Image (spheres, rainbow, N blue to C red):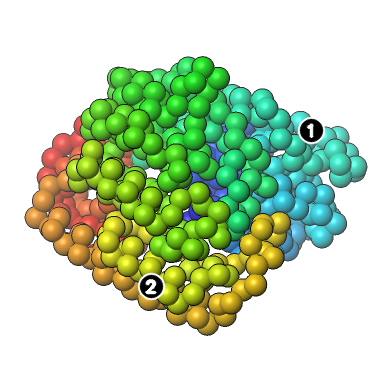
Amino acid sequence: MDRFIDKSAPGAIATGKGTYHIETWGCQMNVHDSEKLAGSLERQGYIRAGGPDGADLILLNTCSIREKASEKVFSELGRLRKLKRTNPNLILGVCGCVGQQEGEEIFRRAPYVDLVIGPRSTASLPALMERVRNGETDVTLRVDTEYRRDSIDFPYEDIRREGQAGGKAFVTIIEGCNHRCTFCIVPRTRGKEVCRELDDILNEVRSLADRRILEVEFLGQTVNAFRDSAGNGLPELLTATAAVDGIRRIRFTTSHPAQMTPRLIDAMAAAGPKVVPFLHLPVQSGSSSVLKDMRRGYDRETYLAKVAAVRDRIPGICLGTDIIVGFPTESDADFRETLSLMSAVRFHSCYSFTYSPRPGTASEAFHDRVDLGEKQARLRELQALQKDIQEQLHAPWVGRTVEVLVEGPSKNDPSRLTGRTPESRIVNFTGRAEIGRITSILVESASAYALAGRKIGDEA
């Protein structure tokens, strides 16, 4: 899920104690973890800095999904060491999955680091910072990578949301993962599944609605495995959230195909337009043989049956997926099966990567029969196919009017604004619109990756 790098964690402007900067690698879960870290700091009186150069505290919130993730973090730490030399009072911390994976080893390789926090220990930040300020030198007292049952009960209500643009908020409902996919390091870095209580989540959602948030996205490594102590699952949560006044859109990610049940599909359909017609359902491979080696818990036919069931109950739904190319046991015939599955399903979006071994995973011991050149060639072929599919799926939208939740200036052209449709299509457009509101856009052109148009309606 290593999809983007965000070098400015959201947070409100507070008064007094110092300035902070958070660099975030990874998925939506990591971005939301940075929100929690920012909220914790701002409750202490910290102000968000414009960048690392002006910060009194720098946190690297890391992801270990991609190849050589730890080395990239140590490389960034080496760059930040120069700031420590010019500002000896600067506190430098490593958070997230690399912090969990490396632990005290970080202090050995980068002794100028002050604290290390795992992804399930974000609430320990104030205590660790206090130890650093008091001159604590024992590294064991400046690292927290423990899994605690109550770590999911971080005070979500206190997350600072005032600076969060785009009218959207992430809401964690489940942490960790009980699956044991042979390629995945998540169970090692984030632990076993721990779920919040339904009422606790709904309290946060109502609070967000009171702050004019229009869209919530429920997060979890396996979000559709959510089940609280009373037996409420994601179907009950979707139904209850749809009844919250002010919430216009509901999303959830990332789902595991094994937990994509008829009851969940029925709940999505019954909740009506509030549950958006988009589902991210990672397949990873189109070959049943490779899926078995990946220990995914389903085969090609089962996955296709799930897709058919979703489309039968929710006509017009858009699908996204993740695909790993060049798994150690993937033959050329296996790869061709992946391409044929992509042609059959016609995903609206696809995150695709070449396989690389992750430390501590079962697939690390597999004999890798696919050399790097072949992996890269397969990835290029797969991505070319996906681009063609996306171009075909986007072309019919030219001339239509779409409802877009405005997120802010377009990254490629700051003179335009950008937002997303309910189906998660990116739309770049001209015209004035309020960030965080929903507005009507006439689509005038389309590419494989986005729609483009102009504003024609008022915000809602």
Amino acid marked by disc 2:
Arg
Question: Does residue 109 appear left or right of residue 367 in this picture?
Answer: right
Q: Position of residue 116 (x, y in %)?
A: 75, 45
Q: Earlier in the sequence, mark 1 or mark 2?
A: 1
SS for tag 2? helix
Quadrant of the image for the C terminus? Answer: top left
SS for tag 1? helix
Q: Residues within 10 Å of mark 2 (few under 14, many from 20)?
A: some
Q: Is residue 398 above or below residue 217?
A: below
Amino acid marked by disc 1:
Glu
Q: Is residue 129 above or below residue 157?
A: below
Q: Position of residue 450 (x, y in %)?
A: 27, 59
Residue lying at 33% horizontally and 73% vertically, measured from the top left: 384
Query: In the picture, residue 183 is in which quadrant?
Result: bottom right
Identify the disc placed on residue 130. 1
- Going by the picture, which residue comes out furthest to the left? 399
Query: In the picture, residue 48 is in which quadrant?
Result: top right
Q: Residues within 10 Å of mark 1 (few under 14, many from 20)?
A: few
Q: Can you identify the residue that label 2 sits on?
A: 336
Label 1 to label 2: alpha-carbon separation: 56 Å
Residue lying at 81% horizontally and 54% vertically, measured from the top left: 105
Residue lying at 50% horizontally and 81% vertically, measured from the top left: 374
